[in-house]
Amino acid sequence: MAEHSSSSDVLALTCELIARASVTPDDVGCQALISQRLHASGIHCEHLRFGDVDNLWAVHGSDGPTLALLGHTDVVPPGPREAWASDPFTPEIRDGVLYGRGAADMKGSVAAFVIAVERFVHAHPDHPGRIAILLTSDEEGDAIDGVRKVADVFRARGERLDWCITGEPSSKATLGDLLRVGRRGSLSATLTVRGVQGHVAYPEKARNPVHQAMPALAELAARRWDEGFETFPPTSLQISNVHAGTGANNVIPGELQVLFNLRYNPTWTAAQLQAQCEAVLMRHGLDHAVAWHHSGDPFYTPEGPLRAAAREVLSQVCGVAPEESTGGGTSDARFIAPLGTQCIEIGPVNASIHKVDEHVRVADLEALPGLYLALIERLLLR
């Protein structure tokens, strides 16, 4: 690992995690490493494995409110390794920047969680309330056996979570310039339109599903679904893939497949959006079928102790009053919010996530434990 002879605790732990090629859903021992550290600090660790997915629930304290730090140890595949300036699973520092898959999304935040909780428990062994870390190896994948399943366990046993801070990389240009206070819902569809295959020279003997579907798709794509909701942007439908045909230019296809996704705000429910889309397809007389996948409802944390503490800490630690946003994609907080938990997201700059040469500034990484520690103290020691 180039450019430094001694590492801070958070930098050293981040590098240990990056060196484990934990491509979703394979944890490759990340959570075992973390639980070993936390156990040494007197923190109770519970391993919840479902299918091929590892989940870790680590808790210290008993009575009072619970603050959970939510993260994931899995990463997306690195893509072509020859495109990287250095091996994606060999952490390397160049010009004050740490490179490696997961550096920003989100092994840096996970390491910072661990360091912050260790420091908090050491300084306040008899603290009020509970401080917890929840980790999964299934955030970047199907998200079926990860936090979604853990939330079901929590619900069944009456586990109470008052506040949740997710370490997703939310910052835009500088650490702490954005505080995410909610997320849109996500609803995906696989639309199949059935036609009749034939020769392009004899269109009267065929039925072209591409031609038939185009007006309906144009209507769905052009629709203004709403004008937004409070801090949420307007609901958006995006067509992400269209496929038909045999590859020959003289064959009318017999079937068309279209993938589209709706990112929606609290104006809608998933069921309402499905009904609206189905009504358009039916009105255009399409012979079709739709397979829907609902990956999460929108959630929103109103003004209260969590947002107030986050604003105060970000302004002091990062020197900037954060933008408060509900933009971006989805996160595992969508499974925690329905438990009645107030959720926010604070993490490093997201410019390089999922890209070749993913990276995080070392200075930002080393500031994260102090940021999370300040939030823990504001909420549990107030």
Image (cartoon, rainbow, N blue to C red):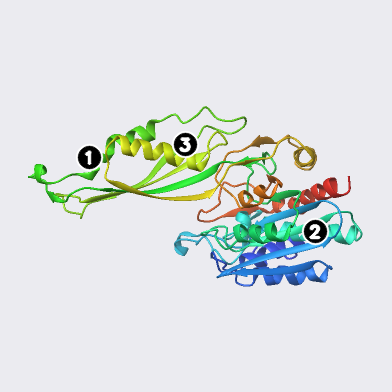
Picture residue at 20% right of the left edge, 54% below the top: 247
Q: Amino acid at mark 1?
A: His
Q: Is residue 231 above or below residue 337?
A: above
Nearest to N terminus: mark 3 or mark 1: 1
Residue 122 pos. (x, y %):
88, 62
Q: Secondary structure at mark 3?
A: strand
Location of mark 1 (residue): 211
Q: Could you tell me residue 80's position as x and y percent? A: 44, 62
Say what secondary structure mark 1 lies in. helix
Is residue 213 rendered to the left or right of residue 96?
Answer: left
Neighbourhood count class around disc 3 (C-alpha, 10 Å): few under 14, some 14–19, many 20 upward? some
Closer to us: mark 3 or mark 2? 3
Tell me which numbered mark, 3 or 2, is placed earlier along the sequence.
2
- Find residue 214 and report its horizontal and vertical position in percent: 28, 38
| Quadrant position of residue 128 | bottom right
Q: CA distance from mark 2 to mark 1?
A: 59 Å
The quadrant the C terminus occupies is: top right
The residue shown at (56%, 55%) is: 358
What residue is rendered at 52% in x and 27% in y?
227
Indicate whether 95 appears above or below 274: below
Mark identifier at residue 117: 2
Q: Residues within 10 Å of mark 2 (few under 14, many from 20)?
A: many
CA gap, disc 3 to disc 1?
Answer: 24 Å
Name, please, the residue furthest toward the left.
201
Residue count near mark 1 (Cα–Cα under 10 Å), binned few <14, some 14–19, many ≥20? few
What kind of element bears circle 2?
helix
Q: Which residue is mark 3?
A: 236
